Image (spheres, rainbow, N blue to C red):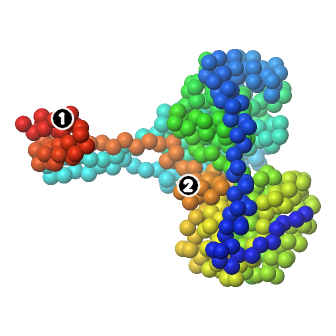
Amino acid sequence: MDCRELTYAGRKDWDEIASWLGARKDPDTKVDGIVRDILNDVKERGDAALVEYTRKFDCETIEAADLRVPQAAIQAALDEIPETDRAILSEAIERIRTFHLNQKEKSWWTTSADGTVLGQMVRPVDRVGLYVPGGQGGETPLISSLIMNAIPAQVAGVESICVFSPPRKDGTLNPYILATAALLDLDEVFLSGSAWAIGALAYGTGTVAPCDVIAGPGNIFVATAKAQLIGQVGIDMVAGPSEIAILADDSANPAWLAADMLSQAEHDPLAASILVTPDTGLAEKVRDELETQCAALPRGEIAAKSLEDWGAIITVPDMDAGCELINLLAAEHLELAVADPWALLGSIRHAGAIFMGHNSPEPVGDYFAGPNHVLPTLRTVRFSSALSVQNFCKKSSVIATSPAYVAEHGAKIARLARLEGLEAHARSVEKRSK
C-alpha cells in the first residue's frame, strides 16, 4: 500500500499540492444528459416513471401502490432491531437534537420614534424531502444520514417531511432505516432511489407531493440531479467525496492517527486522508501503522486505493506552517491531534468540523456527539457551512414605515429612483408625500 510523502515549507509548495488534490473534483459530465432525461421523464410521467426505473434497477415486482411504506410497517420495524440498538439510536437522536436546538433563530423587530417598524421574520419551509442511500443492496443502511438530515428540519419547524430510499430486491427497506424513521416520528417513507427519487421530490407525482428543500447524500446520479435542480428547489449541498486532514505533534499516538485516516479512506476510493506534522519520526510510525491496519480492514481494498491516490503524509517545519497548510487544505473534517488544541483553534479559519485533541476522533461527530456530519467538501468550507436548521428556514424582511417616515425621507428615495431612471418608483413615494 502506497501513501505519498510530501513536504510543505511555505506557500511556494502549495501549487503542487493543490494541483494534485484538484483532480478529485473533476466533474463527471457523462451523466448530465442521462440525469436530465430522467428528471424530465419523472416530471412528465410521475409514478409510472418511478415504478419503471425502480423495477429496472432495484425491485422487479414493485407497483405504484407499493411506493409508500405503510405506517404500520414503519412502526413494526422497531421490534425487528435489538433493544440495545434502539436505545443507542434514541440517545444519538436526543444528543443531535439538543445541539441543533441551539441553532434556532428568532424573528426580530426594531421600532423608531416616528412609528416605523422594521424586522425579519423567520419561517420554516413547508415541505422537505430526505434521501437515504440504501448502502450495498440495503445491507449497510445509512441511518446516520437520516438522523442528521431529519433533525435540523424538525427543529426548524418543518411540518411535512418525507423520506426516499431504494428498496431491496424483495421490495423492502432495511428495518434499521424504518426503525430510525419511527424513532424520529417520520411516517412518510417511499421506496425509490437515485435520480428518479430526486425528481419525484422536486416535481411531485401522483403519490408524492413536491418538496421545497431536498437533502441527503447519494451517488453521482443523485448529486447531479440535485445540482440540476438548483433554482427550482432548495438543496443541502452538492457534496464530493469525504476527506480528513489531521494536524499532529509529537504527543500524538501513531496508531490512533492511522485509524483516523483509515476511517475516511474506507468510505470511497476518492476519499482523501492527509496527515500534517512537523515530526518526521511520527510520520514514519503512522506510515507503518497504515500498512498494518489497512490489511486487517473488511474494506481494506477500498481504503488502500484511497490512500494510494488521495492519501498523504506531509511534513512541515513547524506548527505555524502546519496551520497555514491546514487552512489551504480547507478540509471537511479536521483533527487537531496536538497536546493543546485550544491554543491552535484561533489559527484555524477553514474547516467543516474541528475535532479537538487526542480523544475526539472524527467518528464521534459522524454519529453521536451532536453537530451535523453533513459538511462541505472539496475546499468549499472556505465559503459554506455544515447542514443546519437554517437550511430549512427562509427569512422575510418586514417593513412598516409611517407617514412621518415617508414625509421626512420621501424626497431622498425619489431622487435615488430617478438616478436609476425609474420614474414610477419616484412617483410611488411622492404621491404619499402630498
Is residue 131 positioned above or below 408 on the image?
Answer: above
Secondary-structure class at tag 2: loop
Mark nearest the camera among 1 and 2 is 1
Where 327 sits versus 220, above or below? Answer: below
Q: Earlier in the sequence, mark 1 or mark 2?
A: 2
Residue 405, how many percent across, how many down? 15, 46
Residue drawn at x 89%, y 72% is 288
Residue 211, relative to residue 238: is it above or below? Answer: above
Residue visible at 77% across and 30% down? 167
Q: Quadrant of the N terminus?
A: bottom right
Q: From the viewer's perspective, is 128 left or right of 14? A: left
Kindly identify which numbered label has been placed on residue 102.
none
Quarter containing the C terminus: top left
Q: Is residue 262 above or below residue 107?
A: below
Left or right: residue 202 versus residue 109 is right
- Residue 196 in the image, given as x and y percentages of width and height: 69, 28
In-image side of 192 versus 417 (left or right): right
Three-letter amino acid code at the position of disc 2: Ser
Which residue in the protein does label 2 denote? Answer: 385
Name the residue nearer the viewer: 425 or 296: 425
Where's residue 342, x and y in %? Answer: 59, 75
Q: Residue at x 65, y 30 (%)?
A: 36
Q: Which residue is mark 1?
A: 428
Type of the residue with mark 1 = Ser
Spatial CA span between label 1 and label 2: 41 Å
